[in-house]
């Protein structure tokens, strides 16, 4: 593999969607990836919830706490339904907010959470944003039920990132397509410099 030459520059923006599992009727089911972005600027607080990289279009539940600069403890804030983006104003200088997003009003474990102080914009999905090269090479030819088909596959190359796992998915942000990782991502020459893996498109972005 010494002659490996990566397809740089990595200029396609992408989002890694880490997949976790939960038991539903005794069957392991993949859970959705939720993230939250909060902006606390110029007296305006904007909170945006995303599901699998898209702004959520279904109701979730939001709980907030806040703390003024001189306060020693948190004060409970709003406890309400949210769909997509929620915008409010604040008046206390130097305030800090904690935001938790829940599946519903009775859920006890947050789907995602974030803490931000005045003057900050924080996105919990930021560490999942990467740049890649994406080559299809015409897809992958297969015979399924005696029919010739071409599967929509690609080879992805990017900078080494150990958090990318074989059960994860990747969303290409230039067209919104979602792909499942088919093999264990390969650390080229074990140099912790480049990563390569193969993906197959998930129809409908589901």
Image (cartoon, helix red, strand yellow):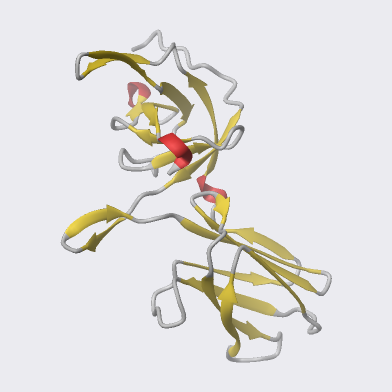
**Residue 185, relative to residue 33: is it above or below?**
above
Residue farthest to the top, as pictured? 3
Residue 147 point in image, percent of width and height: 25, 14
Residue 5 point in image, percent of width and height: 47, 12
Residue 193 point in image, percent of width and height: 45, 28
Instruction: Say how many tags the image has.
Output: 0
Quarter of the picture containing the C terminus is top left
Q: Nearer the viewer, residue 143 or 107?
A: 143
Q: Nearer the viewer, residue 16 or 85?
A: 85
State the residue at coordinates (53%, 63%): 58
State the residue at coordinates (37%, 36%): 180
Tell whether 132 sits left or right of 153.
right
State the residue at coordinates (61%, 26%): 11
Quarter of the picture containing the N terminus is top left
Residue 32 point in image, percent of width and height: 41, 55
Residue farthest to the right, as pictured? 42
Q: Nearer the viewer, residue 41 or 48?
A: 48
Tell whether 182 sits left or right of 32.
left
**Residue 58, relative to residue 150: is it above or below?**
below
The quadrant where residue 163 appears: top left
Residue farthest to the left, as pictured? 26
Q: Nearer the viewer, residue 32 or 204?
A: 204
Residue farthest to the front, as pictured? 146
State the residue at coordinates (64%, 83%): 66
**Residue 97, relative to residue 114: is it above or below?**
below
The quadrant where residue 103 appears: bottom left
């Amino acid at each position: 593999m010494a002659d490996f030459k990566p397809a740089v520059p990595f200029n396609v923006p992408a989002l890694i969607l880490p997949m976790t599992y939960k038991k539903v009727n005794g069957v392991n089911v993949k859970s959705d990836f939720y993230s939250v972005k909060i902006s606390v600027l110029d007296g305006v607080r904007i909170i945006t919830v995303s599901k699998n990289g898209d702004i959520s279009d279904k109701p979730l539940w939001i709980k907030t706490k806040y703390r003024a600069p001189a306060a020693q403890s948190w004060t409970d804030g709003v406890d309400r339904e949210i769909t997509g983006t929620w915008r409010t104003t604040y008046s206390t200088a130097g305030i800090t907010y904690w935001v938790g997003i829940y599946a519903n009003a009775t859920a006890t474990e947050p789907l995602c959470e974030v803490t931000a102080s005045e003057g900050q914009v924080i996105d919990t999905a930021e560490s999942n944003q990467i740049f890649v090269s994406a080559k299809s090479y015409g897809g992958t030819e297969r015979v399924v039920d005696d029919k010739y088909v071409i599967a929509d596959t690609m080879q992805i190359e990017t900078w080494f990132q150990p958090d990318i796992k074989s059960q994860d998915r990747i969303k290409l942000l230039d067209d919104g397509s979602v792909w499942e990782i088919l093999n264990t991502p390969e650390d080229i020459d074990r140099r912790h410099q480049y990563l390569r893996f193969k993906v197959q498109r998930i129809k409908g972005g589901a």
